[in-house]
Structures are given as structure tokens and as C-alpha cells.
Amino acid sequence: MISYELDNTRSEPLYVQIYEKIKCDIELGEIKSGEKLPSKRAFAAQLGISVITVENAYNQLVCEGYIRSVPKKGYFARTIEKSAHKPVTKELPIDTQTDENSVTENELFPFTVWAKLMREELSGNQRKLLTKPPFEGVYELRSAIAEHLKRFRNISVTPDQIIIGAGTEYLYMLINLLFGNNYIFGVEEPGYSKIADIYANYNIKCEHIPMSDDGVDMDYLKSIKTDIVHISPSHHFPTGVITSIGKRYALLEWAVQSPDRYIIEDDYDSEFRLSGKPVPSLFSIDVMDKVIYMNTFSKSLSSTIRISYMILPATLLEKFRKKLGFYSCPVSTFEQYTLARFIDEGYFEKHINRMRVHYKKCRNHLFEQMKKFDIFKNAEISGENAGLHCTVKFDTVLSDNKLLEEITNLGFKASLIKKYYHKKNQPDYHTLIFFY
């Protein structure tokens, strides 16, 4: 009679363990074709488990064709015919490109803590884990985010104002659906091209607003028809510009001049202020309910943890519920409850502190390496006090492409700033973006 050792500490049910062991033995030929398996009752007694557990394992094996059931005789292994031919494989092009602005190093992710919290949730919170959350997301996570924002960003909101999404792209989609394509959106120029691409995919007209040295160009903004402005005032990508307090109030003043005007504040890397105090958010000084706040855990934890959130002004909440409240929250409740505890129990704060120390060392090491090469002489560095990148403007007669080639050959990871302009054939700016 076949016999197996079962592990009660494993997460999967016992019947799955039995199923997997029998399946493996049949595939390896340890259980021969036509061989009779133990009866359910005898097998259950031998393993010290219930008959139902064995029955569930056998039923799964029957369903998948590994064994067959013969009435009044029992269960018998089937013949598994494996192809003698090698599978046909096609050489596919390997995409080695990554989003330079979304990579978290493996050794920085708190795997041990995350696994511990996940296990505890799986064992002690099973009913909630299998309960469908409201469209806004799990309340515990929204509450944890609200408390975190109050402590670290001076943002006072209720959990009801927070909407959980599977990445910022999903939130952009919700914004598109909320306002419709009659609104004109303004995006930063240069800027993160995916934002404009997603808006354009919904047939929304986008205006590209030039950046000045303290934020978007207000004179240009006022000269065009724009309803909603999407900006990253705490640390603009790619220039690294921080929007001045005067410019922030000018933006709020622009927004209140029409009931249809709003500002989307993309606070994507606000946790990584490497020098000085964190820059106050635009949302925290808005008293007229004109700012929609967005942030993501994809930068602070990992790009593969697709959990982002937005905060809606109270004036937009009812409109959102009526128009989009039928949507289901796309983020797994397992991850939401785990992240809620990760924040509430202080692990997120500790993780961010470690990340800041790490990236500050990376930045300082980058600057030390720059000092070794003449090409960086008289170069102007900006945007280095926040985020995970800085820009360097070179004093050179080289073309941008030749400059990038020279820098790459020296072992640096960099990108041309002109590739982030939506118009092609940009002039040479002699400016590169360096990532930490």
C-alpha cells in the first residue's frame, strides 16, 4: 500500500498534498498503469485523516484524468502517454528595457516581514479575506493610509475619500471616466509620457504645459483652454523641479476661477526626500476642494506591488459614487489587509527610513564617481535632494547622442532628457538624467 507523510504546517489543504504526491508518482511511473489505489477508508485510516480528505484528492485526480473510478471496485491509475517529441519553441525578442523610474532592488524589499504578516492574515482573517470589499477598497487599508498621510504629509482626510487602485494607470482610467472626454487635460512638458498616452487613449485632448524653474509656466497655462492639470509638484519627473509655494498658490487660484477646474497632484516619490524637510503637498494647502491627490506603493515598496491610491475632494465623492461605484476594487484583499498591517504596525515607516539611507548613499557614491572624470567639470546638478534621480547639464559642445555615448562608456546609467518631450526632433539640451 502506498504511504505518504503529510505536513500540517503547510498552507495548502491536506487533500492537495495527497493529490500532488499521487499525481507525481503516476507521472514518474512509481504507480503503474492499471494499479489499484487504496480504498478511501483504508487510505484515510493509514494517514490518520478523514475519508472526505482522501475523496477530495481522488476526485481531483479523476477530474484531471490521472486515475479512473470503477464502480464497486475502486480507483485505478490511468496510462499517461507523454509525447516523444520536443516542444516547439520560438525565439522571441527579449525586452531588456525597464522603466528606470520604477525599479526597487530585491535586497531592499522586506520579504520576511511581508511573509509573516501574510501568513497571519491567512490563518486569522479568513472570513474577511474572502469577503468582497467595497469599490473604494478595504476600509482597514484606507484607514491606515489616512493615518499615515496625517502623520507624514500633514494631509487630513477621511478613509471615505480614499480610492484604492491597481497601479496609477488604473486610477488615470477612473479619472478619465469620471470627467469624460469633454474636459481638456494639461500635462507637464517634459514629462512622464505614459500619462499623456493613457489620456489620449480615451480620446481626451491634452495640452503640454512647459516647465519653468519653479513649476509649470503659469502664463502659458492661463493662455490656453485647460480644465484639469496633472502635475508632480513635490519632485517633477524628469527635471527634478520642486514647485515653489508661490506657484502652488497661483495654481490653486487658477483652479478656483471655474467650477470645472481641478488639479491632479501626483506625489509619486514624496517619501524620498533625501535632504531637508519633506515638501508640503499641494493637497494640504487646498481649502477649496480643487486637488485630487495620487500616490503609489510601487515606488516605495516594489514596482510589482500594484497598489496605488487617490484622494478625492469631498465635492467629487458623490459624483464618483454615482458614476463609477459599480466598479469592483481590482486589488486582492490578501494584499490589502497585509499592507494595512504593514503600515499600522510601523513597518512601512522603518522601510522608508532604510530606503532613504540606502538611496542617499547611492546618490553620494554617484557624485563621488562624477568627480573622477573631466567631462563633469562645470556641470550643473539639479533635483538631487529628492526622489531617485537627478539631472546634470553639461558644459560641452558634444551632441546629446554623443554625450550619452561618452557617459555610458564611463559606466554611468543615464538617459537623455529630451526623450521626455512629446514633440520629436528636440534640440540638444546637453542634459542627462542619472538614476540612483
Image (tube, rainbow, N blue to C red):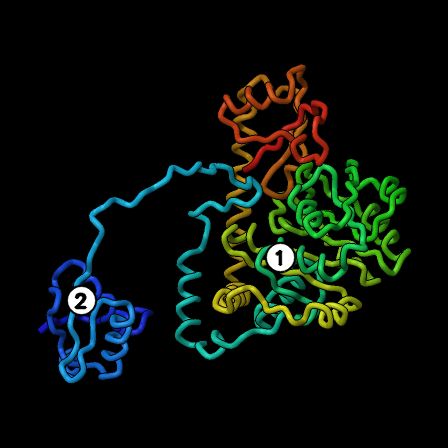
**How far across and down, in percent of the image, does residue 60 sit?**
28, 72
**Given this view, does label 2 or label 1 mark the residue nearer the observer?**
2
- Residue 78, numbered label: 2
Q: Is residue 118 above or below residue 49?
A: above
* Residue type indicated by callout 1: Tyr
In the rendered image, which quarter is residue 264 located in? bottom right
Q: What residue is at 80 percent from the left and 48 percent from the top?
A: 245
Identify the image quadrant of the C terminus.
top right
Q: Relative to residue 368, is residue 167 depicted above or below?
A: below
| Residue at left offset 24%, top offset 80% | 55
Front-most of residues 128 and 59: 59
Q: Give x and y (percent) for residue 385.
A: 64, 40
Determine which quarter of the picture holds residue 259. bottom right
Q: Kindly identify the amino acid type of the residue bearing the numbered disc 2.
A: Arg
* Upstream in sequence: badge 2 or badge 1: 2
Q: Residue at 67% of width from left, 52% of height from top?
A: 267
Question: How far apart are the two marked residues, 2 and 1, measured between alpha carbons?
Answer: 47 Å
Residue that appears at 65% across and 72% down: 326
Left or right: 355 as drawn, with respect to 251: left
Tag 2 and tag 1, C-beta contact below 8 Å: no
Looking at the picture, tell me which residue is in the foreground, 326 or 402.
326
Secondary structure of the residue carrying tag 2 is loop
Q: Position of residue 211 (x, y in %)?
A: 77, 38
The label shown at residue 170 is 1
Q: SS at mark 1?
A: helix
